[in-house]
Image (spheres, grey):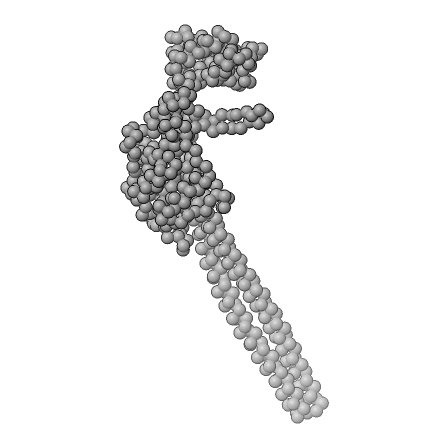
């Protein structure tokens, strides 16, 4: 069970957030059969809540409404993009663009309810003025384990024979704006720390340690899954190394047993040789004594030699017994080693097969995605080419603007557009709309058309793109008013 609380908030991508949070049919199709982190069988446990006070649940529509509200309240357009600010000392500071809609990912318990998370959102609104727009409880995400979970893991469970580690969490989409002033809410580090504590208290979870204490950076969903898979691979590699260590120890024991056996065999050979030499000496003494001192001395000598011979033969038998015992030990060790080698080889083959299958699947997904993107780009280029051809044939304004861009790009000594060319380009931009976003898209379209029609090289493309952007961003207007040079 996820006992530690955590919430991570970042700017909300209003174009893609809804598809993921609502599990739309198109989103699930794009995931494909891989289902890397979503188990559709568990999606029925997901819950959602939409703030009805804001009417339209579409985040893009709400975003556009906020832009209009900011314009009305402040008299200025909302700054959406990151910009640079230059101080009197010449130091350049990057200023982030406005993020009017932000999304928080909140860890929850398996039994956390939608009402629990709504209570958290209401507390956030009361304390900091950030309004929850949407809440989604996701209980169908997680990652697959390579084997059985560790003993202390009580969350994981089996699905179709495979172990699955769930990642229970909630997505909270906030309106981060003050609608009375048209300005963004300002939350500092202390506020975010208090929010973490609030989540732990309301959801009955243990307060997680802050990033300042742990030094760990927050991981996005896919990065978190990859990190978990890396840990699982490290665990499997540790098991493999332990098995190899056991195999090495068994081999070492077998070598020691073989060495001891060889030593015993050598001793037995020496004893056998001593016995043969003693038998020979007995025979010689018997012959000699028969000749010299008669049967009495012969009997005494034979008795001593016979006793010595029996003792040696007894030692030889003992050595043979020890050799037999060690040979049995070696045979058992060899059987154990062979079994361990077979098990180890099977595990290696299984692991290699799993790795290869995963690599093949990833490669197939990558190839499929690359092909799909290439086809989409080719189709978009085809559409752009057709639309460019149509406008060049039917619109004098568009044609004059494109020809002016081509002439400037190919003129090595002319650094910027003249007044007439700027006017032609502005007229062409206004064909597509009168807002900044439309002008930006139209500027890109003019540049792409000029690049294709004029067959511009890389230097000419850079020059054309830069000067068209200067017109779109209003830098030529600034030059005409102040007499300053265009940014280069």
Of the 4 image quadrants, the one containing the C terminus is top right
Is residue 323 rendered to the left or right of residue 376? Answer: right
* Residue drawn at point x = 44 percent, y = 45 percent: 228
Of residues 373 and 467, the one nearer the viewer is 467
Outermost residue toward the front in this view? 180
* Residue drawn at point x = 58 percent, y = 76 percent: 316
* Residue drawn at point x = 48 percent, y = 10 percent: 422
Outermost residue toward the right in this view? 292
- Does residue 177 lie above or below 166 as drawn? above
Q: x, y (%) of residue 441?
A: 42, 19
Decide if residue 166 is in sight here.
Answer: no
Q: x, y (%) of residue 201?
A: 37, 47
Q: x, y (%) of residue 241?
A: 50, 53
- Does residue 117 lie above or below 378 as drawn? below
Q: Quadrant of residue 59?
A: top left
Is residue 471 rendered to the left or right of residue 142? Answer: right
Decide if residue 169 is in sight here.
Answer: yes
* Residue drawn at point x = 57 percent, y = 68 percent: 261
Of residues 366 and 446, the one nearer the viewer is 446
Q: x, y (%) of residue 57?
A: 30, 30
- Does residue 124 lie above or below 306 as drawn? above
- Number of marks in picture: 0
């Amino acid at each position: 069970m996820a006992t530690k609380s955590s919430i991570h908030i970042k700017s909300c991508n209003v174009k893609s957030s809804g598809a993921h949070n609502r599990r739309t049919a198109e989103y699930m199709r794009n995931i494909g059969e891989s289902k890397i982190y979503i188990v559709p069988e568990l999606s029925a446990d997901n819950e959602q809540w939409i703030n009805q006070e804001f009417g339209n649940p579409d985040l893009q529509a709400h975003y556009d409404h906020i832009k209009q509200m900011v314009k009305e309240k402040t008299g200025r357009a909302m700054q959406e993009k990151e910009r640079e600010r230059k101080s009197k000392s010449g130091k350049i500071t990057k200023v982030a663009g406005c993020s009017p809609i932000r999304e928080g990912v909140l860890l929850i318990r398996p039994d956390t309810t939608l009402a629990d998370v709504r209570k958290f959102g209401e507390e956030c609104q009361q304390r900091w003025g950030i309004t929850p727009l949407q809440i989604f409880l996701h209980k169908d995400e997680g990652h697959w384990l390579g084997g059985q979970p560790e003993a202390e893991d009580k969350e994981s469970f089996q699905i179709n024979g495979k172990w699955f580690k769930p990642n229970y969490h909630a997505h909270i989409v906030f309106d981060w704006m003050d609608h009375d002033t048209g300005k963004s809410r300002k939350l500092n580090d202390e506020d975010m720390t208090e929010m973490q504590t609030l989540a732990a208290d309301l959801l009955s979870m243990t307060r997680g340690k802050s990033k300042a204490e742990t030094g760990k950076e927050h991981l996005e969903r896919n990065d978190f899954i990859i990190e978990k898979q890396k840990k699982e691979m490290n665990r499997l590699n540790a098991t493999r190394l332990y098995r190899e260590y056991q195999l090495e120890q068994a081999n070492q024991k077998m070598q020691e047993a073989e060495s001891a056996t060889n030593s015993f065999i050598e001793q037995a050979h020496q004893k056998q040789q001593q016995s043969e030499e003693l038998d020979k000496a007995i025979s010689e003494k018997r012959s000699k004594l028969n000749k010299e001192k008669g049967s009495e001395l012969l009997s005494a000598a034979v008795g001593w030699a016979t006793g010595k011979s029996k003792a040696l033969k007894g030692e030889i038998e003992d050595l043979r017994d020890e050799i037999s015992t060690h040979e049995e030990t070696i045979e058992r060790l060899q059987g154990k080693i062979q079994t361990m080698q077979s098990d180890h080889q099977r595990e290696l083959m299984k692991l290699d097969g799993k790795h290869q299958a995963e690599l093949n699947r990833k490669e197939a997904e990558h190839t499929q995605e690359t092909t799909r993107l290439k086809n989409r780009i080719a189709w978009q280029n085809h559409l752009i080419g057709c639309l460019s051809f149509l406008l060049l044939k039917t619109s004098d304004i568009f044609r004059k603007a494109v020809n002016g861009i081509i002439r400037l790009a190919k003129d090595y000594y002319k650094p910027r557009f003249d007044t007439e060319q700027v006017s032609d380009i502005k007229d062409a931009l206004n064909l597509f709309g009168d807002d900044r976003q439309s002008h930006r898209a139209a500027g890109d379209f003019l540049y792409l058309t000029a690049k294709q029609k004029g067959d511009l090289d890389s230097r000419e493309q850079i020059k054309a793109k830069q000067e068209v952007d200067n017109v779109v961003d209003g830098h030529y207007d600034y030059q005409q008013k102040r007499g300053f040079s265009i940014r280069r």
